[in-house]
Image (cartoon, grey):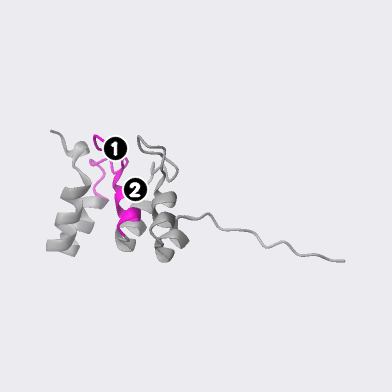
Amino acid sequence: MGLASYSYTSHMGCLERARGSGEMLLARDDINPDTPDKLGQTPLCHAAENRHGVVVKILLGRDGINTDKPDRWGQTPLQYATINGHTGVIALLQPPTSATHNTA
């Protein structure tokens, strides 16, 4: 098993045991954090579902992260965060909205 196929559980175990080491692992260029597990869920999907805002922020800072990548059930990270009521994670995943001003 190569570095690119580390599971979300491996990432989270590192974060729980040693946050600094886990953040370094997630920041490594030789690990693809957008690689899905056997259920089609990416680390971002797991982090969003489980209210791990710090991990979501780290992953969103990486190039190549697909925030709309559905799992095998068609659920995206934003949908999991919404279903579980994780408002902080929802705010991180939602694209910024532009304010519409009426000049009437």
Tell me if residue 18 is in the magenta stretch: no
Q: Tell which circle, 1 or 2, labels the residue nearer the N-terminal end.
A: 1
Quote the CA–CA distance across marks 1 and 2. 9 Å
Q: Nearer the viewer, residue 28 or 42?
A: 42
Task: Give the residue type that dot 2 points to.
Answer: Cys
Q: Point out residue 68 in the picture as x, y percentages from the top left corner.
A: 45, 43
Residue at coordinates 43% horizontally, 46% vertically from top-left?
Answer: 67
Residue at coordinates 23% horizontally, 48% vertically from top-left?
Answer: 28
Callout 2: few (<14), some (14-19), or many (20+) C-alpha neighbours within 10 Å? Answer: many
Tell me if residue 38 is in the magenta stretch: yes
Q: Nearer the viewer, residue 15 or 50?
A: 50
Circles 1, 2 touching at the beta carbon (< 8 Å): yes
Q: Point out residue 31 in the picture as x, y percentages from the top left corner.
A: 23, 42
Residue at coordinates 53% horizontally, 54% vertically from top-left?
Answer: 95
Task: Give the residue type that dot 1 points to.
Answer: Pro
Helix, strand or loop under label 2: helix
Q: Which residue is mark 1?
A: 36
Q: Which residues are magenta?
A: 27-50
Please identify the quarter of the rendering in which residue 35 is found: top left
Q: Main secondary structure of the magenta part?
A: loop
Q: Quadrant of the C terminus?
A: bottom right
Q: Which residue is mark 2?
A: 45
